[in-house]
Image (cartoon, rainbow, N blue to C red):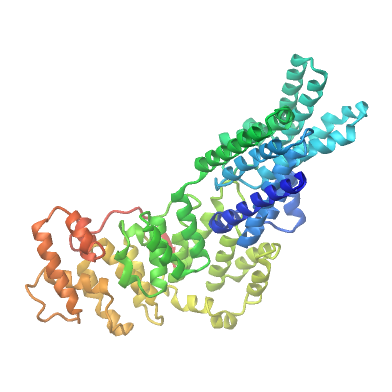
């Protein structure tokens, strides 16, 4: 096989591996897409190009918008990473197999670095274009030393277009000049120092004074968190620089087979180290649950929860929402570990991830004002001040449900300038001002019927009362709110309230078959004041009463040893109640806020 064919096969195999990995981890792509909104407008382009690194940022966000389609997003990541590998290879003069393997090194480091959810695609784009600029500059100036005076102008132009990664271009070109003449080390160091300071002197003081010096030197829009520059960012650029100037020396190694083996081992070890440093299984689980909720794949959520058995509140919120949407919350809620009321609806936190699940829960329940507030806060908390198509779309829905058409049109006009939200925005725009059309809408009409009819003060510490109001108010049949009301009472240990209100289920929701966890709670509460089930107002499963008596015997034998109850009764409400040391009507203290809901 020809060498060129071997090279093509290696790059193709690498691209396929990257594609498959990101396709199987589409939740990372979805997370990136939902925290930026690319607009096809002159104002948007002008805003991006008014900051150093504007071209890389613009191209990065243009490509990121396609992440909404998992296959397209995985293909884009694969192409960008292979592009980086080929950019390094383009700078090699003495070419052979082991130098080709080494050219993958910056790319595999970058592949692991992209697992950090705050790394923006603008960074690999900037690095790749900087390396390709070296090749282009060498071709233009070959045999024309006079053209080298353009170096400073080209470098400054690249800095404004690509950002701090353009230092790769300058460093590779300068070192290449001095290596060929083999003298002037101190002069070379002086050149490199001048190159490092030049962007700050030319652009930092007059045009970028709102940014910290560290951002000007390290890159403004490479990382979502301002003034944070992970070590791997520097490592990728350093390795790309060293390979670009030193890979030709590796080509002179005589033992070809051993060189290929060593180069392959280096690339594999670098990839594993980068992957291990950035892949977080717990974070990936949260992203997966959020991705499935966003796409309303309720059965997939339950199946995934069965597989991973989540214990954090974010994942449990998603799991409980999926169970409720499938009508299984009262049947399977305690098949999964529950922490407290936060596993059903978590308290508000000021960040751009924690409240994602809570915002979805409020919208599906019909708590429209709270859903709007949470989505608005999520968008405004995006650390690099970008907008979100996902959050903006949900805010439009909330505003339309609440008859606030003028405010909705403002967001619709933004979404109309995007690629993947435009068609939806046009359909939403057709509903503005048309109450009859909205009322007939399958989703928005239902939300209007389910939302609160009266105003009250929002208080998280009494969240179960809000669910109760949604469930019992006249003119709506909100079975989802009823299930959340029952679940909240159980998680808070309010058995007396649970038993007292439960007759509403039979009267309003015609719930003739009582879910198993509700049976467990009702039977357990009954035993607190009765010695038998004579006169019990509900029909219980015969096996449940026997199981309760069996549990009582085990509890009496091992009253303070939950490990003896877990194996046989860990999926019951009794186990949850007793292991959380709750008493009837005990209310935990939780963070709350104040907001008028209506």
Which quadrant is home to the C terminus?
A: bottom left
Which residue sits at x=65%, y=51%? 13
**Residue 372 seen in the figure:** no
Q: Taking 129 as reference, is 456 above or below it?
A: below
Q: Taking 282 as reference, is 321 above or below it?
A: below
Q: Taking 477 as reference, is 39 above or below it?
A: above
The number of discs equals 0
Which residue sits at x=84%, y=35%? 137
Which residue sits at x=55%, y=65%? 394
**Residue 500 seen in the figure:** yes
For this view, does 483 lie left or right of residue 49? left
For this view, does 217 lie left or right of residue 304? right
Q: Nearer the viewer, residue 266 or 331?
A: 266
Give the image quarter of residue 585.
bottom left
Percent of width and height locating residue 218: 64, 34
Percent of width and height locating residue 46: 76, 49
Percent of width and height locating residue 162: 73, 40
For this view, does 163 lie left or right of residue 472? right
Percent of width and height locating residue 520: 21, 71
For this view, does 56 lie left or right of residue 307? right
Residue positioned most to the left: 531
Give the image quarter of residue 25.
bottom right
Which residue sits at x=27%, y=79%? 514
């Amino acid at each position: 096989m020809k060498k060129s064919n071997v090279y093509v096969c290696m790059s193709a195999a690498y691209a396929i591996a990257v594609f498959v990995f990101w396709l199987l981890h589409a939740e990372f792509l979805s997370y990136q897409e939902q925290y930026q909104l690319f607009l096809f407008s002159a104002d948007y382009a002008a805003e991006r190009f008014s900051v150093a690194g504007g071209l890389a940022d613009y191209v990065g966000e243009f490509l990121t918008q396609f992440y909404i389609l998992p296959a397209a997003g995985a293909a884009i990541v694969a192409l960008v990473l292979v592009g980086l590998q080929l950019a390094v290879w383009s700078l090699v003069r003495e070419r052979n197999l082991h130098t080709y393997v080494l050219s993958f090194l910056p790319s595999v480091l970058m592949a692991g670095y992209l697992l950090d959810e705050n790394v923006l695609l603008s960074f690999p784009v900037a690095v790749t274009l900087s390396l390709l600029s070296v090749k282009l500059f060498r071709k233009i100036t070959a045999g024309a030393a006079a053209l080298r005076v353009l170096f400073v102008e080209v470098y400054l132009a690249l800095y404004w277009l690509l950002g701090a990664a353009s230092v790769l271009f300058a460093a590779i070109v300068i070192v290449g000049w001095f290596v060929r003449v083999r003298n002037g080390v101190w002069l070379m160091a002086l050149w490199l120092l001048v190159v490092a300071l030049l962007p700050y002197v030319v652009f930092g003081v007059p045009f970028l004074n709102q940014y910290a010096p560290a951002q000007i030197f390290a890159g403004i829009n490479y990382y979502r968190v301002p003034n944070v520059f992970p070590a791997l960012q520097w490592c990728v650029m350093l390795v790309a620089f060293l390979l670009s100037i030193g890979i030709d020396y590796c080509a002179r190694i005589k033992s070809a087979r051993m060189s290929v083996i060593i180069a392959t081992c280096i690339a594999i070890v670098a990839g594993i180290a980068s992957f291990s440093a950035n892949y977080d299984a717990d974070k990936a689980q949260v992203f997966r649950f959020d991705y499935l909720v966003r796409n309303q794949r309720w059965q997939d959520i339950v199946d995934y929860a069965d597989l991973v058995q989540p214990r954090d509140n974010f994942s449990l919120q998603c799991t409980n929402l999926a169970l409720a949407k499938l009508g299984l919350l009262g049947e399977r809620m305690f098949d999964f570990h529950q922490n407290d009321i936060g596993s059903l609806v978590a308290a508000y936190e000021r960040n751009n991830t924690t409240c994602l699940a809570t915002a979805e829960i409020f919208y599906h329940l019909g708590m429209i004002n709270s859903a709007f507030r949470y989505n608005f806060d999520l968008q405004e908390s995006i650390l690099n001040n970008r907008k979100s198509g996902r959050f903006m779309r949900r805010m439009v829905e909330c505003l339309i449900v609440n008859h606030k058409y003028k405010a909705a049109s403002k967001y619709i006009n933004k979404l109309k300038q995007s690629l993947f939200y435009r068609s939806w925005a046009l359909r939403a725009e057709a509903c503005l001002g048309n109450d009859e059309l909205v009322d007939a809408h399958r989703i928005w009409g239902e939300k209007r019927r389910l939302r609160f009819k009266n105003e009250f003060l929002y208080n998280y510490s009494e969240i179960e009362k809000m669910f109760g109001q949604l469930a019992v108010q006249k003119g709506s049949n909100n079975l989802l709110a009823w299930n959340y009301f029952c679940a909240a009472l159980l998680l808070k240990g309010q058995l007396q309230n649970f038993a007292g209100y439960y007759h509403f289920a039979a009267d309003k929701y015609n719930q003739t078959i009582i879910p198993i966890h509700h049976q467990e709670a009702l039977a357990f509460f009954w035993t607190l004041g009765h010695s038998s089930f004579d006169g019990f107002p509900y029909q219980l499963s015969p096996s449940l009463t026997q199981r309760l008596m069996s549990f009582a015997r085990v509890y009496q034998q091992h009253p303070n040893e939950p490990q003896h109850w877990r194996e046989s009764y860990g999926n019951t409400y009794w186990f949850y109640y007793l292991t959380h040391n709750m008493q009837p009507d005990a209310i935990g203290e939780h963070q709350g806020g104040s907001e008028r809901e209506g």
